[in-house]
Amino acid sequence: MNAIEVIGLEKKYGKTTAVDRLSFEIAPGEAVGLLGPNGSGKTTLLRMLATLLKPTSGYARVMDLDGRFQAPKIRRFLGFMPDQAAMEEDLSVEEYLVFFASLNGQSGAQKNSRVKGLLDLLDLGPVRDRATGALSRGMQQRVGLARTLIHDPAILLLDEPAANLDPRSRAEILAVLRELRRMGKTIVISSHILPELEDLCTRIVILHQGKLAFAGPLSEASARFRTRRRVDLRVGGDSTKLRESLAENTGVAEVAGSDGWIHITLKEDQQDIGFIARRAVELGLPVLALREEVPGLEEIFMQLTKEKKEP
Amino acid sequence: MRHVPLAALISREWRTSWADRGAYILRAAYAGALLAGTIAAWVLLPLVGSGNPDEYPEIIRSGFGMFCRGQFVLATMLAAMTFARAVCREQERGTLDFLILSPLTRTEILVGKLAGEFLGLTALVASGIPVLFLLIPLGGVSIPGILWLQVTILAQVLVVGGVCVALAAAIGRTFPVMLVAWALMVVAAIGHAVGRWWWPKSAVVWNLWESISVYDTLGRQLSRVQTEAGPAFKALAAAAVVSILCCAMGSLVLEKRFVRGVRVGMWSQVAARVRRFAGSLSGAWLFRPLIALDHPLVRRECAIYRDLPFRFCWMALVIGYAIIARNALHDSWGRWGDHAELASKGLGIGAVLAVLMGAITVGYDRRRGNLQTMLACGVAPEDIVRARMAGLVLRALHLMGLPVIHLALVSIPAGLCPPGEMLWRLPAALTGLLLGTIVMMDFTLKYALSFRRPEVAGVMAVLFALPLGALCMGFVGATFSTFSIGLPLLIVAILASGARNIRKLPKWVMR
């Protein structure tokens, strides 16, 4: 059973197609990064998955429940955090969480322990009595995450949870998300901060102009979008001769150097990288380090969106 | 376990809207105002009429009747504001998503919000009841009488609440919801009378309408010697049914509007067409500004052809005025008194609209941070205040212009202005009108900038700025001596008040 199964999902606003017949699957316990430029349909997709928006056509199945007919049941499994920190400004943090716990049918000891647990998990204890409207943006995001987790959902849909946060707050939110992933939650997270997604997610879904540009494991994306391999080499002694020698090799596209490293870009058909180390040894230079650069999420994202822009 | 989430929602409504400092102050102010009125009744009663104690019950009864009608109108206004804000605020903040994702159904969400706010308003009404009991020793009113009339007023609150919740689900913006709800309540109160006059053949419909109208129930209760519990509770039960039906209807609309996503609706299409027309040469003449516009901010504020709600309001007012004038006066062109009455009422409605719209537009501009941005960009506070004032006065003059011209034309035949005094009285009245309008809009601007909630600023402006403006208008235009004293005094007062607004603007906006 998939946690989420999207089948031909489409959303149109008048003549504009926000999401164009998407189909992909997310297994339970996976952390999936949802990427795409602004206006690519990420928020619309998340709102449709959260049953807050009806698709024009197609449907999504969540925990084997059909989004078209079983929305109230689906909502029990979902925790949705929108991109804006929507707060009840007049309630204190604790009152706010207690309200949402009660709204989800919790009462008595269960409610109190749940709220206390979340206050501890998200380090909200020191601000529990402060009005949510008076909190900093970072704290509000944490309170929002606590609200999302209040009914212990199996699936988390997070729309830009770390947007507009300072690096420390971002790191703290991501640490909580890693912990949640470890606890077995399925996480779908939309973000523009790609290096952090790379750290958290095992799979990515990339949208471009409402269409599915890529959906699959990060490693597959790296392999697919690796057009040119880059190898970094560090040797002892003077590396000038080695660089000249490598530049003359037919399998090498470009050789550059900085801070004692030699950056070698290989041609597309060049598979073997052993010749680089062999050449260094032949020239009597000790090989201190040799590493292959794997294209990161940012590179994949740029490449995908660039490809789509160019007709 | 469905009662747990619903109770949580009602409790939250109570906590966030009616358990804060402002709500306590409001209840205290209401009870205080009633206490002041009651003390005044005790002190002044011997001075009214012949001073005979046998007449006291009748005087108290009639005064209490007037109070109840006033309370009815105020309760309608306040209820519309409260209920509209309760639902629209959820949508504006984005917190409605969380309620929809909860186990509550949409109808339950709306019922929960309705119940929470109704509890708050009930507490407000209840806070004044013990004070009203102080009138009982004077005669004319009894404990059941006071209670049943207050129950009738609560029935009206519930009806307004239901209507507002349904409208808020459909429209989603506080101010339009309030306006539409008020308009509907006016129609509900007087519609059957107008209908009976317009189309007397459908008497059955008008009778039925009258029998279920809460305003008429209140009137019938007041006309009885002994107020009855039955009609009051019937009205409350009917109001509860109506409000729950409204919630159910609202939930359907919410489903359609909210879950299906943003759509380019009919209103937006019409608005776009009108905006295009207004920008054209042939359309702009309708709202051409009357003064030189040097400063870009003043130009922006006075570009009223871009202000769509104002424009629709103005058109509705002019068309409505023309229709009423045509229908009400077509067979009585000779009765100049009727013309004067119509013009006065038109002037009053125009002034109320100007004040309300002014307070709410400026208030929302402040809330959205537009004024803060301007100050941060280095725009001088005096430029902002002057530009806003120019815009407000211009809009007020547009809204009040037609009735004023009508009033000026009929003032001599209607006997408002003796022909011999025309030379000074007419200019004095027009000067008084201009100065009164400026005073009114100056206070409106002050309230809009200083109050946290634009709706509260609107109500305050109607309660205080409007009577003050009318007072200034009447003072300057009354006699030659009041004109000669009032004119310089008012000019100085307006300049001083403007200077105060300029001085305080950064404090109000930057907090």
Image: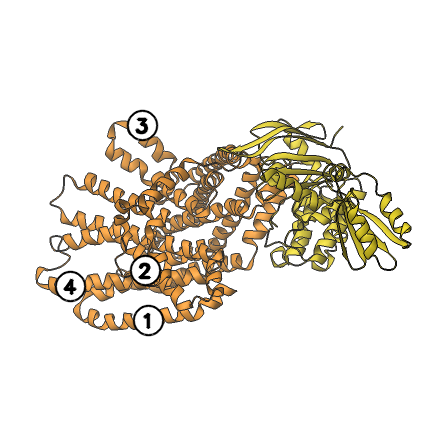
Q: Which residue is disc 3 drawn over?
A: B204
User: B371 or B444, which lies in front?
Assistant: B371
Q: Secondary structure at mark 2?
A: helix
Tint applied to chain B in the drawing: orange
- Chain letter, disc 4 residue: B
Q: Are marks 1 and 4 on the same chain?
A: yes
- Chain letter, disc 2 residue: B
The Cα atoms of the two marked residues, 2 and 4, are separated by 21 Å
Q: Secondary structure at mark 3?
A: helix
Residue type indicated by callout 2: Pro
Residue type indicated by callout 1: Leu
- Chain letter, disc 1 residue: B
Q: Secondary structure at mark 4?
A: helix
Q: Are marks 3 and 4 on the same chain?
A: yes
Sequence-first disc among 2 and 1: 2
Q: Which residue is disc 4 drawn over?
A: B425
* Residue B223 rendering spot, x and y as whole percentages: 33, 43
Residue depth check, mark 2 versus mark 4: number of the one nearer the observer = 4
Q: Which residue is disc 2 drawn over?
A: B467
Asked if the residues shown at circle 2 and circle 1 are in contact, with their CB atoms under 8 angstroms apart, the answer is: no
Tint applied to chain A in the drawing: yellow
In what quadrant of the picture does the C terminus of chain A appear? top right
Residue depth check, mark 1 versus mark 4: number of the one nearer the observer = 1
Sequence-first disc among 1 and 4: 4
The Cα atoms of the two marked residues, 3 and 2, are separated by 40 Å
| Label disc, if present, on residue B495 of the rendered structure | 1
Q: Residues within 10 Å of mark 4 (few under 14, many from 20)?
A: many
- Residue B227 at least partly seen: no
